[in-house]
Every structure is written in C-alpha cells, then in structure tokens.
Amino acid sequence: MMKKEKIICIILLLIIILTIFNFEKKQTIRSVGGEKIPDLSLHSLEGQEKKIVLGTGEPAIINFWASWCQPCKEESLILNRLFFNHRDKINIYAINLTKQDDLTNIKKFVIQNQIMYPVYLDKEGLNQEGFDVRNFPTTFLIDQKGYISKIYVGVFGEKTILEDVNDLLNIGK
C-alpha cells in the first residue's frame, strides 16, 4: 500500500510541475476592445531611455519575450518576416523581460536570431506588470488609435498573425 501511495504522489507532483512549467506551443488569442495603451518607458540594448508612443496612426505589435524561452525564438523568426514585409505599415517592438533575463544572453539571442525589429529592455518589470504578462511569449496587437486589438499568449501561428495584421491594415478588403 505504501508503494502505491508513493507512486500516486510522484505522478501528482509531475502533473503539477508540468502544469506550472507548461511551455508547449499553446496559444490563447483574446480579442479585446477599449483598452488604450499608455506610453511605454523602456531602455535600448545600449542602455538609452526610450519612450514609445502608440496611437499615432500606425498599428503596432508589442512582443514580450525572454532569451531562455524556446517558443520566443520561434516567434522571433515570424516577427522578422512580418517586419521585413510590413515595416512601412506596422511598428514591431520586442520588449525583453530583463528582470528575468541577462543582458549578455539577450544580445546573443538578438544576434543569433538576426532580429531586425527594435528590441527594448523592461529592466524593472513595470511594463510586464502593466500589461499583466504572465506567460512567455505574450504579444499584443495594437490598432492605429493605440487600443489593444488582440492578445496572443504563447506562440502565434504565422498565418494567424498575418491575417490579423491584414485585417487591421484593411489589406485585401
């Protein structure tokens, strides 16, 4: 009987651990409306302060990521292609969760993945808290007026994000 209870405890513990550290390719997409994004105060990779103002007529993608997050690597490749094809129509901002990362690893990630879009640091985690980011990656699609259009928790599919961006830009309509 004792052996059976130990096995059950081990199985339950594994289930709890897998649930807590679930970094599978799960995706949650929420359509949102009415929540305006405030100006963002961040730092460049070189340490310079940067203020990002949204709602100035161009839509934006805000991507929260970490260098140790494998799904973030996948997503960076998709964002690179999106940036290359639509950089004149949409702004893309990658915000690293620096409070949970290391600057050397961040710079290495950017170089290895040939990230072309702007990368900023959330040193104190204030933007992470403000956006209520709990999972990595988390991406926000922001409309032309600065309102959240969609939230993607986990890796988004390239087809999904492209359709959503095209809808926002009214391409193909």
Image (cartoon, helix red, strand yellow):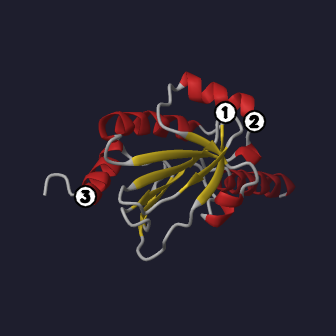
Residue at the far right in the pictured view: 2
Q: Residues within 10 Å of mark 2 (few under 14, many from 20)?
A: some
Alpha carbon separation for disc pair 1 and 2? 6 Å
Q: Quadrant of the N terminus?
A: bottom right
| Comes first in the chain, label 2 or label 3 | 2
Pointer 2 residue: 102
Q: What's under tag 2, amino acid-wise?
A: Asp
Q: Is there CB contact under 8 Å for labels 1 and 2?
A: yes
Which label number is shown at residue 148?
Answer: none
- SS at mark 1 in the image: helix
Q: What's under tag 1, amino acid-wise?
A: Ile
> Residue at image x 62%, y 39%?
69
Pointer 3 residue: 167
Q: Residues within 10 Å of mark 3 (few under 14, many from 20)?
A: few
Q: Residues within 10 Å of mark 1 (few under 14, many from 20)?
A: many
Q: What's under tag 3, amino acid-wise?
A: Asp
> Residue at image x 41%, y 60%?
56
